[in-house]
């Protein structure tokens, strides 16, 4: 029996198919693993950012009981009973305090467990007169001086974190002041990130979630003993505490990560869908396989042509070289078109930034002219005095007048130099610069408008660190933010702006905060988009340009809660 002989072309085709199949399997596995790793890293990064947001919020609320413990009305209310005048005075103070801080409710419980005053005293759901001595946060605070306890509200039936602090008198404890914090606002902030975010305690119970349906569910089954303890304490009322819809161990379409929080046992869980990432990974694997197959086909074709048609080898090489040359030329042309498009985009962005600087400079030129006119008039007066003193041979007074004129001339020079620097087209240079100089330039550019508008601006103390940025463009960002803040506080009886500098490791944050009406929640982060503005006559370009400038500095521009109650923007740059 003769051995089976496979024709060379068929053998080459079968080998190509086998190699292509193996390559696709390897490429798909690699691309899928890479997609999961990238999704996991991104989910962990956003989880840490959200955890920082929650920890900062809780830290703010932890200060409230400490501050309230110093209220004289609080001690009078705890000793005067629920119906006393002191309790009603405290009601009127707690209500606006809860509204300003965002606390769900603030209330005072006397040593016997009876609520004597509350921020919601004037509402149908008032806590006044309720006996809370059975609540763990009350007993723990009376025993340990402070407590934190997450539970359903006994009256509102809404979950929240109860923070208690014992108030001591000369003869012993007078009672407990309690601040209840609900996490709806934080959960709404988390919801801006894709995926699902869960706040869980040490038992795996979901305390807060971006999806309200997941709240008061569990990540893992609870033991009968644990359920009995929860039911006995009344922590979650009659809630059944079922399992969440999230199945991290079995659902390969979701990447799940977690990070610890400042509260003991609490963790933040992020679940991000990877369906799109897997689809992109499959597309990448197919593209790589197609490229591999194309290369393999070309190699096989060359081999076959060399074996079967040696006489056509030169023609095949010529055709192949021509194809490669055309493709290279096409790629080169595409690269040149993209480079030109990028150059035009950068030029347009710089033109827009320059126009924004000139617009800002135009709005403050009148004030700077006033700053220059005053020393010019003074120099003229000093010169006339010098002539008068010179006639009288009073040379010491002539020298004093000339010295003062020189100093005023230097003042004019610094103002005009700052105007020239601010109006000059940016060179794109990013280098170590002194923040003190940036602050001084900003003060020169907007100082007159602050005085004209009657706005108080708290500047940072000198001795600021160096940062990596461009001076003119960083001044442009600060001028935009401060001008926006001045517009925001217009018409207020106590317009107030503060410019803070905070150092966090390798980063420096420049925060501009005001006590205006704040940013419309409907706008949110959209205020950085072109032509989105909260001003009736605004173009909506300044904040977008400012964020682009901060991105070029490898920094960020973000909205923060204002310490003054209005709006606050934080520009973050790297320390030099």
Image (cartoon, helix red, strand yellow):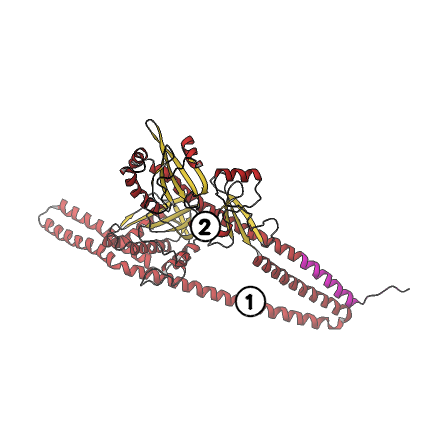
Quarter of the figure with residue 131: top left
**Which SS does the magenta portion mostly show?**
helix
Instruction: Name the spot of residue 399 as percent of width and height, x first.
Output: 16, 46
Residue 531 or residue 177, whichever sits in front: 177
Query: Residue lying furthest top in this view?
Result: 171
Instruction: Say the numbered circle drawn on residue 332.
Output: 1
Q: Is residue 505 visible?
A: no
| Mark 1 residue crowding within 10 angstroms, few (<14) / some (14–19) / many (20+) | few
The stretch drawn in magenta includes residue 185: no
Q: Which residues are magenta?
A: 1-25
Q: Is residue 188 above or below residue 59?
A: below
> In terms of secondary structure, where does tag 2 sit?
helix
Instruction: Name the spot of residue 541 as percent of width and height, x first.
Output: 37, 61
Quarter of the figure with residue 426: bottom left
Residue denoted by label 2: 187
Instruction: Name the spot of residue 257 as percent of width and height, x first.
Output: 55, 47
Instruction: Name the spot of residue 48 as percent of width and height, x first.
Output: 49, 46
Nearer-N-terminus badge (1/2): 2
85 left or right, relative to 211: left
Quarter of the figure with residue 86: top left
Quadrant where the N terminus is found in the figure: bottom right
């Amino acid at each position: 029996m003769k051995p089976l002989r496979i024709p060379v072309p068929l053998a080459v085709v079968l080998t190509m198919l086998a190699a292509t199949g193996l390559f696709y399997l390897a490429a798909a596995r690699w691309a899928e693993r890479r997609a999961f790793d990238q999704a996991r890293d991104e989910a962990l990064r956003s989880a840490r950012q959200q955890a920082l947001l929650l920890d900062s919020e809780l830290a703010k609320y932890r200060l409230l009981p400490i501050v309230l413990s110093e209220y004289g009305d609080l001690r009078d209310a705890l000793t005067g009973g629920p119906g006393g005048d002191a309790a009603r005075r405290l009601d009127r103070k707690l209500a606006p305090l809860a509204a300003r801080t965002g606390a769900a409710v603030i209330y005072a419980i006397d040593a016997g467990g009876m609520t004597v005053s509350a921020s919601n005293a004037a509402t149908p759901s008032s806590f006044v007169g309720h006996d809370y001595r059975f609540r763990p946060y009350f007993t723990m605070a009376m025993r340990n001086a402070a407590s934190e306890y997450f539970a359903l509200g006994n009256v509102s039936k809404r979950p929240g974190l109860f923070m208690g602090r014992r108030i001591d008198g000369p003869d012993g404890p007078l009672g407990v002041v309690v601040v209840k914090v609900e996490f709806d606002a934080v959960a709404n902030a988390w919801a801006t990130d894709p995926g699902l975010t869960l706040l869980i305690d040490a038992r795996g119970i979901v305390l807060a979630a971006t999806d309200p349906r997941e709240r008061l569910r569990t990540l893992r089954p609870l033991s009968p003993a644990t359920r009995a303890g929860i039911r006995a304490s009344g922590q979650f009322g009659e809630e059944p505490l079922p399992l969440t819809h999230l199945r991290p161990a079995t659902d390969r379409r979701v990447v799940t990560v977690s990070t610890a929080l400042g509260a003991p046992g609490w963790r933040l869980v992020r679940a991000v869908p990877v369906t799109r990432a897997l689809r992109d990974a499959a597309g990448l694997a197919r593209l790589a396989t197609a490229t591999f197959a194309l290369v393999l086909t070309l190699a096989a074709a060359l081999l076959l042509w060399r074996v079967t048609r040696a006489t056509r080898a030169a023609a095949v090489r010529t055709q192949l070289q021509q194809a490669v040359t055309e493709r290279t030329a096409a790629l080169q042309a595409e690269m040149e078109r993209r480079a030109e498009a990028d150059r035009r985009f950068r030029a347009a962005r710089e033109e827009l930034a320059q126009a924004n600087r000139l617009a800002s400079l135009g709005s403050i030129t009148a004030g700077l002219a006033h700053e220059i006119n005053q020393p010019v008039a003074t120099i003229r007066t000093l010169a006339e005095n010098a002539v008068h003193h010179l006639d009288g041979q009073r040379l010491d007074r002539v020298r004093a007048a000339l010295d003062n004129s020189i100093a005023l001339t230097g003042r004019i020079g610094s103002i005009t130099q700052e105007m020239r620097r601010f109006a000059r087209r940016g060179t794109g240079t990013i280098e170590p610069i002194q923040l003190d100089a940036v602050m001084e330039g900003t003060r020169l550019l907007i100082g007159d408008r602050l005085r004209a508008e009657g706005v108080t601006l708290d500047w940072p103390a000198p001795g600021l660190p160096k940062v990596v940025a461009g001076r003119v463009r960083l001044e442009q960002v600060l001028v935009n933010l401060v001008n926006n803040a001045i517009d925001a506080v217009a018409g207020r009886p106590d317009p107030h702006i503060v410019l803070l500098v905070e150092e966090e490791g390798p980063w420096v944050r420049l925060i501009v905060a005001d006590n205006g009406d704040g940013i419309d929640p409907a706008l949110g982060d959209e205020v950085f988009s072109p032509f989105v503005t909260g001003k009736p006559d605004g173009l909506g370009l300044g904040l977008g340009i400012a964020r682009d400038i901060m991105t070029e500095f490898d920094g960020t521009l973000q909205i923060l809660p204002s310490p003054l109650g209005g709006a606050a923007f934080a520009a973050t740059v790297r320390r030099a």
